[in-house]
Amino acid sequence: MKALSFLNPEKFVAVSYQIFLIVINLGICFYLLDKSAVISREPAPTVYAITSADIQQSGITAPHMVETGMYIENFQEFDLLNNHFIVSADVWFKFDPKVISLDMIGKFSFDKGEILTMSKPVTKMIGDKLLAEYRVQLKFSASLNHRVFPTGGYYVYLILSNTLVSPNDIVFTSSESSFTLSPNLFIEGWKEVGHSITAGYNKVILDRHDSQTIIYYPMVLFGMDFLHEGMRSIFVIIFPLFILFFIALLTLSLGPTTSLSLAIELSLGEITGLLAYRYVIDTLSPKVNDFMLSDHVYNLILVLSFLIFFFHLSARVRDSNFVRGSLVISLQVIFIAVMCYLLIFWL
């Protein structure tokens, strides 16, 4: 009987019961937000490997292999919000100088990037291969997927290519050890959790009805995974939304008669605060067309807040403690159910 009494909806009108549910839901949400370390990936360009079909189709002869790699020293700018990056790195190539000229190697470029400075090549012989190293400072943008903003992480990639040569001349090769980052690399608010390198070539189809119009050139894709450090962005963007919603919930604990006007004023004030906070979220968020996690959380809380406001306007229905308690339970269940869906399945 005591258990049934505890579950009586009329009990949940009390502030103590509401706070109990709020604490539980907050704990679940922040636990899931902390554990939802999902790397949001935008599909990267395909890097092709030389196949026998390509050789027959394009007339590629025996290509000369050029081992390619990169050492990232530091990021001068790392702005995921505005998609702006400046990095200092060493780009290196190892090749046979008898068949490949240093001038040909030095004509590399970066897709969606601009080389701000590039040193003269530092070279040395390693056996019968020549190692050429270029120190570059590169400004670039990346194809970023902001779906999980403000939690999770991002996949940032660089594409090195040489459009002035074809696989008949050279083909870039690499290994996992060819791409390294400085152990002293520090990016405030972010940590690098993985990186990869893929070498091969790109093909551009000028006319899909004519296989003779396909253009080939060597390329290397350098990919890096970054995760948020700490929960600052979550507290700045998501936590105020939770606070506003729980304030609206607590208005259901106000008495059915004497506190009606106060409940309506508080509920309306909470909605006004939500609408104003939309501007803050937009200021702190990346400018994208697709919905992000922060948008879904905001829309959820806005809809539930309007339900509470319209409930307060229904004075007759509001008189019943049973109805108000049932609404408290329903809104809390809807809130945590949608949040669990977003943070477990949608991500």
Image (tube, rainbow, N blue to C red):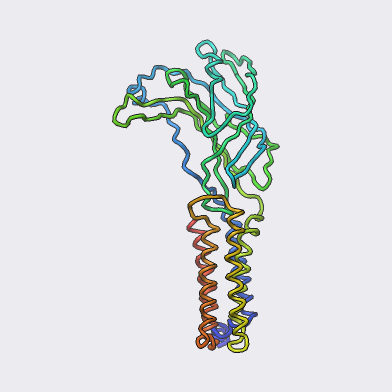
Q: Nearer the viewer, residue 1 or 214?
A: 214
Tell me: residue 223, above or below residue 293: above
Q: Nearer the viewer, residue 158 or 31?
A: 158
Q: Nearer the viewer, residue 192 or 2?
A: 192
60 on left or right of 160: left
Tell me: residue 88, above or below residue 170: below
Residue found 56% across the figure and 55% down from its top = 36
Residue found 67% across the figure and 35% down from its top = 74
The residue sitting at the left extreme is 209
Q: How many marks?
A: 0
The quadrant the N terminus occupies is bottom right
Q: How far across and down, in percent of the image, does residue 92 sit? A: 59, 24
The residue sitting at the top extreme is 98
Residue found 53% across the figure and 88% down from its top = 320
Q: How far across and down, in percent of the image, does residue 59 sit? A: 35, 19
Q: How far across and down, in percent of the image, does residue 338 sit? A: 50, 65
297 on left or right of 136: left
Tell me: residue 187, above or below residue 130: below
Where on the picture, by quarter, is residue 156?
A: top right
Q: How far across and down, in percent of the image, does residue 46 sit? A: 44, 35
269 on left or right of 161: right
The residue sitting at the right extreme is 184
